[in-house]
Image: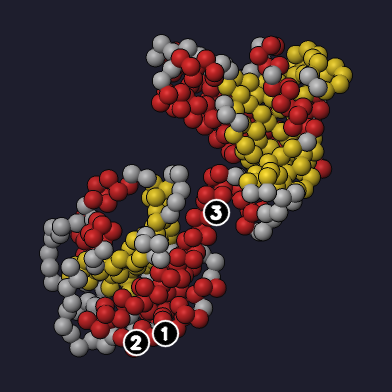
Amino acid sequence: MLELAHTDQPGGSVLDEASSWLLDEAWRLDGIGDIVAGFCARLATGGLPLARLGAVIGTLHPQIRSYYFVWRRGEDIEEYKGEHGIETTDRFVNSPFPPVFYDGVSVRHRLEGRSGPFPYPILDDLKAEGITDYVVMPMEFGGGERNALSFAIERPGGFADAELLALYPLVALLGRVLETKALRRTAVNLLDTYVGRNAGERILQGKILRGDAETLHAAIWLCDLRDFTTLSETRPSAEVVETLNRFLECMAEPVSEHGGEVSKFLGDGLLAVFPAGEDDIGEACGRARDAAQAAVGRMAAWNADRAAASQDPLGYGIALHRGEVMFGNVGATDRLDFTVIGPAVNMVSRLERECASLGCPVLASGPFAELVPPGFREAGVVRLRGIAGDHPVFALDVR
């Protein structure tokens, strides 16, 4: 579908600057956006004065299907995220990109001397900006993943045959450079999603030996959904999964929004930490308390929706404690896990079980509550299984 124009404009060798840069320097840059911007600058130096370039790079991410980078001459590069499902939207379907992604062909639209309406809305916009020629090319990665680059120029006469022919090997070369950056970004995405941001960074830094661990001061959070066993035995599987995901979302999002990190999902609950230095553990406890308040608010709103739908409310418990934890790599020789362990984790686990018996959705230990007294009230003294002594506990005054 790529229609070549027969002109006498130069091409080929004038793009050697971009080729040399891709081979010798581009791989040193940190990110995809930096490489795309540098590539456009070298094309201009080589004699191809682009007005605009767009790069669509696919990824593996639970929410994001692809990244979209847009470079315009004289402006900083912009990055957008395309969520899963974008391929079914009018914005994508009514664009030049489907034949590029699905058929692996290039698409060209000359706009100079032509009036709309054009087959795609973006072409009307480009025409209004003074674009004379627009080309979209596929860019494949080694695993067969198909990405796309779009080129737009304002020059009278548009692109020359030789320029377009020279762009093909350049696009292939650019794809080899971008693939390494895209793979690292995918690795970061997956590690952040499945093991957490802090653990993911440690893995990428090479801290992968079994037993690699360090001591952290942290506020510790553990929560649990009540009567999940009964729910799973009496409701359809799809409803059970949807309910569990909604509950974990109500808990995990406030944790992240207040600077904590989910260490592990525990079936129908989760363990999270709010790391701190020795001198700012009180601040970390305050963030954990605020996250708990936010989670309580989300659960109240959800239970109100459930009541309106004639569904039973869901009970839950959140326990808060503080102390030292060991954060590191534990497990078998061929199956490892980054997690937090230690007496403080055992303490918060035992404490969470008291939420139901005391009728309090959020309970804090004495060491936690003493650092953030506003918002807590005494709820009693309990004995915790496997932990010696009597332990005063404090309930969060739910707002």
Q: Residue at the location (57% across, 29% down)? A: 267
- Going by the numbered disc 1, the residue's amino acid type is Glu
Q: Is residue 207 left or right of residue 383?
A: left
Return the residue at label 1: 17
Q: Which mark is residue 188?
A: 3
Name the residue at the front extreme: 333
- Quarter of the picture containing the C terminus is top right
Residues under numbered marks 3 and 1 in contact, where contact means CB atoms less than 8 Å apart: no
Q: Could you classify mark 1 by the number of other residues whose Cα lies within 10 Å: few (under 14), some (14-19), or many (20 or more)?
A: some
x and y percentages locating residue 4 in the rendered image: 18, 77
Whether residue 373 appears in this view of the structure is no
SS at circle 1: helix
Q: Residue at the location (66% across, 21% down)? A: 362
> Can you say whether 184 is above or below 346 in the image?
below
- Going by the numbered disc 3, the residue's amino acid type is Val
SS at circle 3: helix
Task: Looking at the picture, tell me which residue is in the foreground, 165 or 336.
Answer: 336
SS at circle 2: helix
Name the residue at the right extreme: 389
Rounded to the nearest angstrom, the CA distance separating label 3 from label 1 is 32 Å
Sequence-earlier tag: 3 or 1: 1
Q: Residue at the location (79% across, 14% down)? A: 382
**Of tags 3 and 1, which is closer to the observer?**
3
x and y percentages locating residue 364 in the rendered image: 73, 23
**Of tags 2 and 3, which is closer to the observer?**
3
